[in-house]
Structure formats: structure tokens, C-alpha cells
Amino acid sequence: MSAVGRVGAVPGKATRTIILAIAAVLFILPIGAMLLFTFRVSGSPGEFTFAHYAAIFDPSQELTYDQLFQGIDNSLVICAITVAIVLLILLPTIVLVELRYPKARRVVEFVCLLPITVPTVVLVVGFVPVYQVVAGVFGSVPWTLAFAIGIIVLPYAYRPIQANIAALDVVVLSEAARSLGAGWLSVLGRVILPNLRRGILSACFLTIAVVLGEYTIASFLSQTTFQTALLLLQQTDSYVAAIFAVFALVFAFVLLLVIGRVGSFTRSKRTAR
Amino acid sequence: MTVTTHADSDEKAAAVLGSPDLTGPLTIKGTAVELVGIVKTYGSHRALQGVSLDIHPGEFVALLGPSGCGKTTMLRTLSGLDGIDAGNILIDGNDVARVPVNRRDIGMVFQSYSLFPHLTATQNVEFGLRMRKVDARKRVARATEALELVGLDGYGERYAHELSGGQQQRVALARALVTRPRVLLLDEPLSALDAKVRVQLREQIGRIQRDLGITTVFVTHDQEEALAVADRVAVMNAGVIEQIGTPEELYLQPASPFVADFVGLSNRLPGVVDGDEVVVYDRRLPMLRDGAAGEVTAMIRPEDIEFDDSADAAGTPDTLPAVVVASSFLGSMRRTTVRLADGTLASVQHDVRDRPVPDAAVRLRFKGRPVVVRSR
């Protein structure tokens, strides 16, 4: 290895393997333990069974897990609404600011990153009185949580879209498209959005991951979501709670993989001739 | 990079225009463009102060000037990317000042690389045709021909990041031309390229422009570029056109000291106006324009001064003593900076075979060509 390589930031192959191994153990060990736990027979260590998995689909136990499935339903609805908020409010705002009001970029960035600096518990204190009003308008229904979570996800949704925009010269691209005869809709649909695909998808997946992992707001506002139901269930049937926790982790992991694939797919598609 | 020969590209241009399925409403013909009293204000800054410009059908006009002179603003108002506060923009006699950019039927090439990154070169070129609802088969055929026109046949499947800067700008040119626009607008399309590619591409642009006969406006801050390709050059300064004329007119008969200064190099030497002549260091030189009086600055081209190489050390009576400061070899000629007796620096352009050494005493002679003067 060259002298530059030795003083440079890139570690050697052995070092990399060790780092990767430690990281893998740190992640795999608890998840593996959890998975193992889901197969255990209550009260008799060393024995394994599929009974806990079967119980989920057992109609006679439907009532036990009813709340969990309700929570999953609610969470999925909240996911959809939050993603819609990101796509229909945040995305147009970012694009509009970039094209028309570049001076407002700093303000938008500040506002979008602000939620990450405020602990959720603190936010919730503010949300409680607000939600008294919200409940008055829409009723105390779970999907209204999407409004609060829409704020929590702002930093996660803003960064990938903004990073994608920063890598493009959106102004010149849209001017070029306009000079070629495109109206604003075509500029948006045929030039800007296709080039922001990666950022938009990342933003959506991160949003979904955040929504599925959200506990504090739902708990404080007394709504049943996946996480709150999971916590309740853990007190009655910790095995099934662990099964769903592992599922949730695997789902989040798959989402992250997909984000990665989306990026490399765009790249490989371009390099392949 | 492929360098197409002149004859080669002539053929290609003829092929594009001559194909039977390409004639019709979109065939390029020179269109007259007239800008009348254009005023454009950004906040309190008046970027264009009532500019008028008359461009003949098929003409190649360059807008030349320092940054902030309003040349890009002028191009943007002509394209419709920027609105105007007052004035008229006539394309083919119709006022288009209120027509949005996507309906003005112009082609534009930008300074920065503007190819759509998610599309191949061919798809980029097709974009304008797609917007005009040209059917798919014709689109591909015309895009292919446009790429041939700019010498990029075979590059159609590549994405922007697989092309060099010069190739990207050529695709952008093909993309701008494929719709057969009435006017082609070039906004410093070469400034991001390196020197050699810049010269090649500007020659190619000039050739294609002549072959197609498309009315073209080219914005640049590089005087060499403007003088090399344009039929006429409009020199802009502080939101007005200082002078418009052929490259020769601008160089030999600059209408203002600014033009004399901006187009080509000029020495600024102190002089006094006497009748229709100016006296510079006791030598009388003819003036290009009347109007100035008293003490003036005379703008004298480096090639209008020569070394007096007569053997007599004292010099002939009409020569000026000077001391060589520095001399640089510029390939086909040499430019030497000298210090005159009163400390003024002057630049002299001369044959490369003369090699003045620093600190050498030399004698200068004015060739007596007409000069522009500026009041002091």
C-alpha cells in the first residue's frame, strides 16, 4: 500500500472486516436473540415451538391480537397520509422555492430541520392543546396523528429531496425545457420529478420508517398505533410482541435496502450502454 | 472529439434541410428580429435602459460586453425567460413581448450544461419535438439527423454524464435546432469549455449557423469569440448598446472610447486636441471622431506603434525614447511593454524576430493611423 494510502482515511481490508464484524454482531446478536425468543416454550428453556406464530392466526385468540392489528391498520393509514403530506406539501414547496423564491431556501431549510432539535416529548406538550382543537374538528381519530407526525418527519423527508435538488441545476433545466416548448406541467412531470425520483423515494421510505417507529406522540395523544399496541401486547403476550418487533425491524431493513437499490439502479442503468 | 470538416458538415446540413419529410412548417428560414426600446429593471437596478437592436433575417449577431452590462438580460428578454418593463420585441414583425417562452418558437443553448440527466442524448434532442406532439417515428429520425448535424452520430444512446463538456453543448445545440426555431439564442455556450474545444465548437456553430441560415444571437464576454463568428457585434455597456457593427468596424472605427478599450487592446496615452488632430508626445495623429477638445486620452492600438530600428542611437526626430519592461511571445507576434520617459506604460506589438530584452533602451514611432480620443 502506498504512503498516501497509509495516512489516508481508508482503512485496510483487515480493519474493515473487523469493523464490519463488530457492527454485524452488535446488530445481529439482539435481533437473533429476539428471534430465538419467539420460538421458546414458556417456562421450559431449551424447548422450541411454532405455537406463538400459530397463535397469531388462531381465530379463537383473535381478541388478544385485535388491538395489535388495529394498531397496524392505523399506522398504515397514518403512513399513507404522512407520505401524502410529504408529496403534496413539502415536495411542491421545495421545488417552488428552488425555482421561484431561492431567497426563502434558508428559511425553509431551518423550518424543516427544526423538529429534529426538539425532543418529541417536548413537542407533544405543545401538541396536546392543539389536538383538542383538531379532535373538535375531525373527532378523536387515529389518522389525525399524521398531522403531528408530518412535522416529525420533515427533517427526514427534506434532506434527501434537497440533496437531490442541490445536485441538479433545476433552474437551468426548467428554463431549457421551457425554451423547448414545455409548459409548467411538462417541466414538472417530464423534467423535474423524474430527476428527483431518488430523493423522493428516499423521503417516502424514511417517512414510512419513522411513522412505523413512532411511539411518543401516539401514546401521549392516546391513540392506538403499531408501536403503542405492541407495547400493550408485550405485557400480555411477550412472544407475539417480539415476533412483530422482529417483523418491523426486518421491514425497516428492507426499506433501507430498497432506498439503496433505487440509487444504484439509476446509476447502473446509466453506466450500462 | 470528432472534428468534422467543412464539406462534411455542409452535406449534413443540406441533408437535414433537404429531406422531404422534414420540410413543412418547421423549416428554418431566417427571421427578422427587432428589439425596440427595451427597458428591464431589477429592483432599483436598470439592467436595460431602452435598448434597440435590429437583426436581419439569417444574421449572426453577437452581444459582447463585460459582466453586468445587460447582454444576458437582453437575451433572456428576447427568449421570454425574463419579462420586460417597456418596449417591443418583434419576431417576424409580430410583437412577442407578452408571449411566454414556451410559445416563442426559439431555440436556446445555455452557459451551464443543461441536458436533462435522466434522458439519453437522442431523448434530449427529441424533447422539443415531443412537446410539439410530433409522432414517435419522425421524432427519432429528426433527432438522429440533428445529432449528425453537430457531428455526434453514434452518441445518441449516451447520457449526459457519459459525454464531455463539448459534446454536451453540441447535443444541447442539436436539441435547440431540431424544432427548427425561428431564432437561435446562445448564452455563452462555450465559456465552460477548455480553450481548444472552445475554438473548435465556435467554428462549428458558425458553420451550422451559415448552413442553416438561422437568425442567431450569441452572448459572450470574450471579444475574440464575438469577432471570430459574428456577422455583426453589438458592444454593450451599462445597459445600453455602445456600438453595433461588423467586427472590422468595431476594431478599426470604434465609436466610443469604451469600445476602443473593450474590443482589442489600446494604449492610453495623454494627448491634446488641436483642430482635427491630436498631439501625443509632440506627434500629431489623425482623430477618428471630432467632438473632444483640450486635454484627452488617446487610445492607440499596440500594432499602431513600432520600434524604430535605425542604427542612430540618438534616434530620428519623430521617435520616442522608452525602456523595455517586459516582452511576451504570443506565437504569431510578440507584445512588448515599454516605459516612456514620463513613466507611462505602453504596449507595442511587433514581429517575433525582434526580441527586446528588459531594461534595453528603445525608440518608438507611431504609425500615424487614426486614433480614438476620450476627454480627460
Image: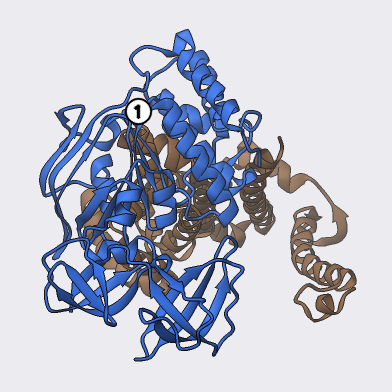
Q: Residue at x 28, y 29 (%)?
A: B57
Can the viewer see residue B186?
yes
Q: Position of residue B114 (x, y in %)?
A: 46, 45
Instruction: Name the tint of chain B in the rendering.
Output: blue
The amino acid on which the numbered mark 1 sits, given as a three-letter code, is Pro
Q: Position of residue B74 (x, y in %)?
A: 25, 49
Can the viewer see residue B67?
no
Dot 1: what SS? loop
Q: Please say if B239 is above or below A271.
A: below
Residue at which label 1 appears: B181
Left or right of A246? Residue A137 is left
Q: Residue at x 75, y 54 (%)?
A: A38
Q: Residue at x 78, y 62 (%)?
A: A28
Left or right of B279? Residue B37 is left
Quadrant assignment, res A128: bottom left
Q: Quadrant of the C terminus of chain B?
A: bottom left
**Number of numbered discs visible in the structure rendering:** 1
Farthest residue to the top: give it.
Answer: B20
Depth order, front residue of A157/B111 = B111
Depth order, front residue of A215/B292 = B292
Q: Please say if B23 is above or below A232.
A: above
Instruction: Name the tint of chain A in the rendering.
Output: brown
Quadrant assignment, res A154: bottom left
Q: Position of residue B125 (x, y in %)?
A: 49, 30
Q: Please say if B37 is above or below A245.
A: above
Crowding at dot 1, Cα within 10 Å, few <14 / some 14-19 / many 20+, comes out as many
Q: Residue at x 27, y 37 (%)?
A: B101
Q: Position of residue B343 (x, y in %)?
A: 37, 91
